[in-house]
Amino acid sequence: MSGGRNGPAGVAAGAAAETVRLTIDGTPVEVPAGTTIWEAARAAGIEIPVLCHDPRLPPAGVCRVCLVDVGEKRLTASCVREAADGMEVATAGEKVERLRKGLVELLLSDYPVDAGGTERKTETDELRALAERYGVAWAGHGNGAAPAGRTVAVAGIPAGNGRPIDASSPVIRVDHQACILCDRCIRACDDVQVNNVIGRTGKGYATRIAFDLDDPMGASTCVACGECEKACPTGALTLVELVERPPSAPKAELARVDSVCPYCGVGCAISYYVDEAKNRIVYADGRESPVNHERLCVKGRYGFDYTAHPQRLTRPLIRREEAYPKGPLSSETASSNGRRRKPGGLVDYDEVLPHFREASWEEALELVGRRLREIREEHGPSALAGFGSAKCSNEEAYLFQKLIRAGFGTNNVDHCTRLCHASSVAALLETIGSGAVTNVFADVENADVALITGSNTTANHPVAATFIKQAVKSGRTKLIVVEPRRIEIADHAEVFLQIRPGTDVAMYNSWMHVLVNEGLIDEAYIRERTEGFEALKDLVADYPPEVAAEICGVEADEIRRAARLFGSAGAAIVFWGMGISQHTTGTDNARCLISLMLMTGNVGRPGTGLHPLRGQNNVQGASDAGLIPMVYPDYQSVADPEIRAKFEAAWGTELDATPGLTVVEIMRGALAGEIRGMYMMGENPFLSDPNTNKVRKALAALEFLVVQDIFLTETAEFADVILPATSFFEKDGTYTNTDRRVQVGRKVLDPPGEAREDWRIVCDVAATCGYPMSYGSASEVFDEFTSLAPSYAGLTYENLGLTGKLWPCPDPEAGDGIQVLFGDGFPTPNGRGKFVPRPFEPAKELPDAEYPFVLNTGRLLQHWHTGTMTRRARALHAIAPAPEVEMHPDDLSALGMADGDRATVASRRGEITLTARASRRMTPGTVFIPFHFREAAANVLTIDELDPHGKIPEFKFCAVRVRPAGDQAT
Amino acid sequence: MSLIHELEALQEERGHLDAASLRDLAHRLAVPLYRLQELVSFYPHFRTEPPAALEVHVCRDMSCHVSGGAAGLRERLEAAFGDRKDVRVRETSCLGVCELAPAVRVNGTPARATDPAALAAAVADGPLPHPRAAPRAWQADPYGGDRDGAYHTFREVLARPDREAALDDVIAELEASGLRGMGGAGFPTGLKWKLVRAERAAPKYVVCNADESEPGTFKDRVILEQLPYLVLEGMMLGGLVVGAERGIVYLRHEYGAAREALTAELARARDTGWLGEDILGSGFSFDVEIFVSPGGYILGEETALLEALEDRRGEPRNKPPFPGQKGLHGRPTLINNVETFAWVPGVLAGGADAWKARGVNGCAGLKAMAVSGHVERPGVYEIPLGTTVAELIDMAGGVKDGRPLKGFAPGGASSHFLPAAKADTPIDFGALADAGSMMGSGALVVVAEGTDMLPLAANVVRFFRDESCGKCVPCRDGSQKAAAMLERAMADGTPLDAAALEKLEELLVETSICGLGYVVLNPLVSAARHWPDEFPGLGDGRGGGGGGRNGTGDGSGNGKGGAA
């Protein structure tokens, strides 16, 4: 049985057709064949006590508490025993109850009195509850023989197992003495999250749960998803947060707010438990939803406390006169010019804040309005630009682009999606007429083959990755991973191709070559649903596996094996991420993947689809809402007069017909003096954009910059005015996840000081710019947005409910929205999908003798974008406090360096110094640096070359050299 | 290659399994680290520290205990090896050479350690000779020791034109013979074969359980060494009857000589066409491989054994389903003990009636018995079922040094002790059960007058504690609590708490997953019943513990058992 995914774990797959009839405590019960006695009893409203079972997990039958009498010689464990026809089950006779009590006593004989308790756990302490039920004395049994009063005494039974406490994890405390070896954490780790970290070590009474090779939890490969703590029925696994910072009220009295996660595009459903007296989130727990089935990752479960960080901005700030001319205010951000460097961390408030003074909202807004108006009057609307954010809500994105377009009069509005999936969207719009995913990630369970390429899924979309890992574990789905790094999900793959960076086009052209040659294509689909196949066929003829093998550094036979596996799938789905999109050939990469799927008919059916995994929580929604320079909300072209007329009517003003500039183009414009005034809502281009040194100059060159954020970011150092905004937790709003699921994020906390909701600030700025906008609530904004965005038609805060809806949603009152798109054609002029053949082109800056390594940049599981939130989250910071460069151990030793040494990494644009980490997951000749850390900002190194179609920078490829820190540059 | 075999190969190459090597292996195979840790920490064959040049393993269990082994012996051995730094002496669970008690293994070679100084001197002179049981004429061998005649019974069945009828006849003959499982549970062999034959799922498997590890038990070792062709022929017949093409002998790792004999016989059988594809043009294919157990008594439990074959910790499964229904890889699996398979050709060759007639005192058939403890000539004896315990003791030369008999365990460590007065009990499933014990694993452990029963009972309880896999609560915790109570009683005479023991026994017997848990307190309960004055706190006439909750002798209480 494969765990929680298939509903009640006690029901064997495929056995649902037949039913069996039995009696439980005299009550006749009818259940599907394969149902366990325990589940059958539960369905009949009879609760059988148990410690080792959790309906989300496959049963184990080890605690024996659920024993029942089925009239056989021996009692049987109801959690593992299948119900059978004619069975007569007695669940609670005198003997059974006596034995249950005996088992509880046996467990308590070793149980530390001071362990756990429900107040320290996400869920209930079930052992304690059973002890109460059976009247087994809990506390007050001092036992001189036991170590330091830690153990409950049970008459006649020697006490204490002497096992240790493992406090090495910043989030979960492991009290081995309180562990009853119920196996639930192990199954939660293996079967629910498929992280495969926890097992049992030792044998017999000496058995303990263990992480990896019996390593301390905090030093193991544990990813701190918290699923084990949630599954644990005793005080063995407890929350550090609850142990060390107990709330001011008992857990049962905390307020619960059902919302979603602020981090990645998966958009997990979460309940936040709030200490209202302290205006503090105490803990978070996964909610049941099609998105996450209660699962969370480390960020969602433990990363919420940034919102209460003392560095939150609480009043508007205005740059002091003496802080001009503008430049970076932190000394360390001045890069490689030999000035003092601090050991690391975030923007130093002590250093930066004195350059600003607090101001009233009135004064700050007046200044913003005046300066922006002045620039517009002097240099025209195109001298202004705005960056919205994929972290803000649909409503905020909608209002922001409306302000820029209708209030400022320019289409120069963009956001960080430009930096992640612009090329994917460009390719999708070009070929199939829609930039969104064609199917939800969870449908991988219906796929025969899943292809993951350019996506470190377990780090960047951890909960989506659990669906993929479960599908593989169930045996249903075969996984192919194509990646330059042997990322963790590659360990689950049937075929893993460790390709040279930037050679994706050659790889997939070669797959298509094999598919064409071996007849593994869907000719009917090609004929009826597509156009342009002949040209593609001609092109891929030039890419036999031997040719691709040369380019990609992978054996030709391995390429054939992957292509054949893919081509033989009845249903195949592809997931891709920044490894595909963040190249100067990003659009070409995506075009190849789209061609691959069209050629094999893998769009528009269950288990098939194109799924570019969206990075931030609202990448999809921010794009849908029009934070794109070429289109209005719902991808309606600004150049189309008819559409423009519609928006002019709706917004009551004339609109510019010229598509605006994109993110990197705007920065270039600032440097060139063409962009003079900017409004940034929640964006931090200083760290997120390529070639930081150039960005720094561009930001410094702006005449006027207003930054709206919750912390003092690196970008805010260049601001004239800083406006304090609310965090995700302090406002209502809708967010659209990677699946196109529109979900309501609800206000959990009150904002600090004078911080205002972002959408209200946008309205305030609009008013000062002469374009007043007025709304009573976020939902009112949402209604205006949906009235202009056909894909969102019919959605309202009310019908989105607790688990949201997928767009499009033809029947929002009853339906969940459309999961699989394009079963009957594409939203293109002729309804056909288009093949766009593309030849392989190398990256812009190839390694050479001077800069011999290829730099790959990306993200870590624990951190988020530019780190402003996650680096202020206690647990996340504790787990991943500092930047590291990952290299293959052979490369490292060839440089005379070892794991843990300080390394200086230099490109033609700058250099940074950070700790070297040896990793066999790297391909020799490549290095990986996450971009979250300002003290070793990866984007100091990256190149600002753009993909010509998607205008996305080549974050994934540039040439660098590495030397031990301290050595002089050569 | 299975993960267990990968670990064995790595240990072979590196001498031990250090963390760095394990991480390399996990990376190479893309398996989670915890899976390696689970196996390495569970199976005694694996070591994480480099071995000494000379590894001396001292058996501390039942037969060796009564013969002066264990802790005292370890210290004497350490003294005998003096200041040799390259020697490590450590205690270990039963080595399966109880006839050598007090037994040790020196770098894998078993030896008797009655005289530690002599042993140390012999070791200094070079590798020890490998002791082997003397060859004998086995009555149960239809070929009279002539291997060239072997597999005749199998060929006769294979040659019958109506295969289905022939196989039905095999089952009918086995059922009529009364042959029962010889590993402990005593399940009727013909019925088991019939049930597995009736299963629909495919493929099916045949597994020979050659993992006898219960203190006092070593009969299968001698059968494997001397009658490997009968074991294989039994498996071939099993494969033919149930419809399996693959057989596996699950062999305990200490049985090197048995492995050699079996390997040689496998090669011979393949060379002569008895194993392989399309055997003798019959359309039936069958082959057998040997899987060497990485160790542990619990692996003899048939579902634990299956777990090991599937690369997991040897933790018994919840039953049902039984292995005959869902065994190896979830497929129907015929599992029989070595002796059971070995007797099948003889039963079929002579027919059920002839087989039954070989018993005495109204009992049917033959039995291999391991005799150890306080007898003059410990070893394996082939007896007619129905032979009395006293007669078997006489065959073994009588009680050692002419001492009076105090009691005995007729079926290995898990069987209830019986007093000398019961020595006239015939050795048979029913008679031993009626007497309050069981046939068990065919291991008579003899205890002479003058033996203290509290330390002996404590020794056996501790064995089960040590060998508990740790999966289920009652066995993992209950065995430890019982062992701790006994140790305390031995250390300072603390009276045993009868009520607590009774509660523990009920939990162990009623709630454990497998037979090991059921039997943990058998030796204590039975010894306390028969010799109450030797157990402080229990000597007030109320007997020990629960008074033998599991003394039914039907074999289901045996740790090696399983009832599929």
Image (cartoon, coloured by chain):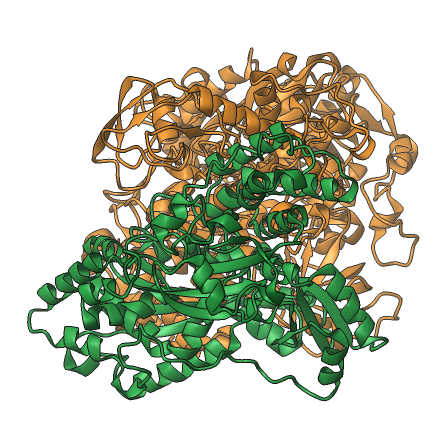
Residue A652 lies, with reference to residue A381, above or below; the image says above
Q: Is residue A381 left or right of residue A150?
A: left
Residue B266 lies, with reference to residue A348, above or below; the image says below
Q: Which shade of the palette goes to chain B?
A: green
Give x and y (percent) for residue A123.
Answer: 59, 25
Does residue A422 appear anywhere in the picture? no
Quarter-wise, where is residue A224 in the image? top right
Q: Which shade of the palette goes to chain A?
A: orange
Q: Is residue A167 left or right of residue A602?
A: right
Q: Residue at x 53, y 58 (%)?
A: B445
Q: Is residue B429 left or right of residue B98?
A: left
Give x and y (percent) for residue B551.
Answer: 45, 41
Give x and y (percent) for residue B316.
Answer: 46, 49
Q: Residue at x 26, y 39 (%)?
A: A15
Residue A800 lies, with reference to residue A33, above or below; the image says above
Give x and y (percent) for residue B274.
Answer: 26, 81
Does residue B51 appear anywhere in the picture? yes
How many marks the image carries: the answer is 0
Of the pair A650 and B38, the residue shown nearer to us: B38
Q: Residue at x 45, y 58 (%)?
A: B389
Q: Residue at x 63, y 49 (%)?
A: B462
Quarter-wise, where is residue A161 in the image? top right
The quarter of the picture where the N terminus of chain A appears is: top left
Of the pair B250 and B223, the residue shown nearer to us: B223
The quarter of the picture where the C terminus of chain A appears is: bottom right
